[in-house]
Image: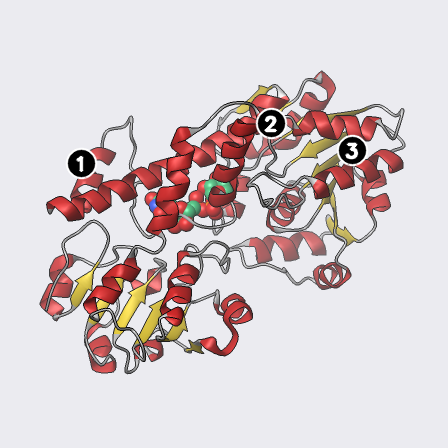
């Protein structure tokens, strides 16, 4: 099939590349000339495991091409995906100007029947708006479909190629049939393609992300309470997670959820509620608890150093909002580091992938180490913000030799309490007892 993808951000790029992988002829459109040139030369503009291999293979096969021309995009694809940003507005709602702007242009350019797909995460009612905007510009027949993505950063290629489900919001048989044909190769395992109305599809995405964010936030509160009563959240998590109604996943407490989806989507659903005379009390609480959780390590660090962080030096391991990505959007590390700097502390950082992005944001206010051990040389404490695998089994002797004192504040519960105790560390983690030296 002939496919166009408008917008080559994270979602658009993964969508375009993976659709080319099953033999479709995919043209990706972006207004950024430099980026398009880069992609034409075979360079993937984001870090996402396995994407580079698929990218190269499909470019070589001639199935994946790039252009800055929306006109070309509209004439090329029988199905046109809108994978444009929907940034958070000041009031928490999703800003639809990119999506509706593209819809208007498509309306002006469309010459024959097309299926326009909302792939971006958009509030309930957006498919109707997109339809209206296009219809205002043209008499040509078209259908608008909502097809939310459920891609996790770091696993996006796998999630796209082997989805647990595909959700299609469509009220047109013709469009539904085309979409089912497109996705069939990805659900050969028998996973469902769930067809529903557009509004339900739009809400499914927000409901899924908000539910997961709530699940994590609930565990973060249980972890905080564990500390008050001397329980161990690791044990509670295991005890709970074996109940299949609850499930083992997304029960890991930490220093809050971050990234480009959860924070934005929870706020957008909350705002969407307000706009429709409904108050999501639960989401209000989730937003507040998560904001506090992001900086929960700070009072502990301050109390350990008797309230005076001026001139103290810290190593921070893990800057991305989660492992296997270079994405620092809403990363807890940012909030912690901003506060540490404000208190007069010095920070040396290390992250396997996110260093360039952090450098852009923090410049020379931080020191950048070449590896995880170098970051710990002479520091008063190590702060762990992201659970990259490389941090899971460090050489504790080397750490002790490097650090001016063996102190770890761990926001991701990476280490066994007995082990750090045996190694002689002061160790503070989330929802577990603090190991004092
Ligand atoms: C999420 C959804 O999983 C995905 O379906 C959607 O399309 C986009 O948003 P992503 O943001 O890439 O994906 O990351 P995810 O792995 O879901 O983690 C989100 C955040 O929750 C991270 O900050 C992570 O550290 C945190 N998290 C996750 C926890 O704190 N505890 C957990 O148990 C799981």
Q: Give the structural element (helix, strand or loop) at label 3.
A: loop
Horizontal side, residue 252 vs residue 422: left or right: right
Q: Give coordinates of residue 291: x percent, y percent.
A: 39, 48
Which residue, given by chain and number where applicable, does mark 2 sit on?
Answer: 124
The residues bearing labels 3 and 1 have C-alpha atoms spaced at a distance of: 50 Å
Residue 315 tag number: none
Quote the CA–CA distance across marks 2 and 1: 37 Å
- Between circles 3 and 1, the one closer to the viewer is 1
Q: Is residue 55 left or right of residue 345?
A: right
Give the residue at x 27% y 42%: 221
Residue 173, by quadrant, is top right
Residue situated in front as seen by the camera: 386 or 17: 386
Mark sitting on residue 239: 1
Displayed-image quarter of ligand 1: top left
Q: Which residue is mark 3?
A: 78
Q: Position of residue 358 (x, y in %)?
A: 50, 67
Which is more N-terminal, label 3 or label 2?
A: 3
Q: Quadrant of the N terminus?
A: top right
Work out whether mark 3 precedes mark 1 in sequence or the reverse, and give the earlier one.
3
């Amino acid at each position: 099939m002939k496919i166009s993808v408008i917008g080559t951000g994270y979602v658009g790029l993964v969508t375009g590349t993976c659709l080319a992988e099953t033999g479709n002829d995919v043209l990706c459109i972006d207004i950024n000339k430099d980026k398009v040139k880069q992609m034409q030369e075979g360079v993937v503009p984001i870090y996402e495991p396995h994407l580079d291999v698929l990218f190269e293979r499909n470019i070589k096969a001639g199935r994946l091409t790039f252009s800055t021309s929306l006109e070309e995009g509209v004439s090329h694809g029988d199905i046109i995906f809108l994978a444009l940003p929907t940034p958070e507005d000041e009031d928490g709602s999703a800003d639809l100007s990119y999506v509706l702007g593209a819809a208007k242009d498509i309306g002006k350019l469309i010459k024959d029947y097309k299926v326009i797909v909302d792939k971006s995460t958009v509030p309930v009612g957006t498919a109707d708006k997109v339809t209206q905007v296009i219809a205002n510009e043209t008499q040509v027949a078209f259908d608008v479909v909502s097809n939310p993505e459920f891609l996790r950063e770091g696993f996006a290629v796998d999630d796209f190629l082997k989805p647990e489900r595909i959700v299609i919001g469509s009220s047109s048989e013709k469009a539904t049939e085309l979409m089912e044909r497109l996705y069939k190769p990805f659900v050969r395992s028998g996973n469902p393609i769930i067809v529903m109305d557009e509004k339900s599809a739009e809400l499914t995405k927000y409901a899924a992300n908000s539910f997961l964010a709530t699940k994590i936030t609930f565990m973060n509160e249980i972890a905080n309470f564990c500390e008050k009563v001397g329980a161990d959240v690791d044990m509670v998590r295991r005890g709970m997670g074996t109940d299949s109604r609850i499930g083992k996943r997304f029960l890991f407490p930490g220093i809050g959820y971050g990234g480009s989806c959860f924070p934005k989507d929870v706020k957008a659903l909350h705002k969407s509620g307000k706009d429709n005379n409904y108050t999501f009390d639960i989401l209000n609480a989730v937003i507040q608890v998560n904001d506090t959780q992001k900086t929960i390590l700070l009072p502990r660090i301050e109390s350990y150093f008797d309230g005076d962080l001026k001139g103290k030096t810290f190593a921070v391991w893990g800057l991305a909002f989660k492992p296997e990505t270079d994405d620092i959007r809403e990363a807890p590390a940012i909030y912690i580091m901003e506060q540490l700097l404000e208190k007069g502390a010095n920070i040396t950082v290390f992250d396997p992938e996110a260093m360039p992005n952090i450098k852009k944001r923090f410049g020379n206010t931080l020191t950048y180490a070449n590896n995880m051990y170098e970051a710990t040389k002479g520091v008063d404490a190590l702060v762990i913000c992201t659970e990259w695998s490389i941090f899971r089994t460090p050489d504790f002797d080397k750490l002790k030799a490097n650090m001016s004192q063996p102190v770890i504040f761990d926001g991701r519960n990476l280490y066994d309490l007995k082990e750090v105790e045996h190694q002689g560390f002061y160790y503070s983690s989330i929802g577990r007892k603090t190991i004092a030296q």
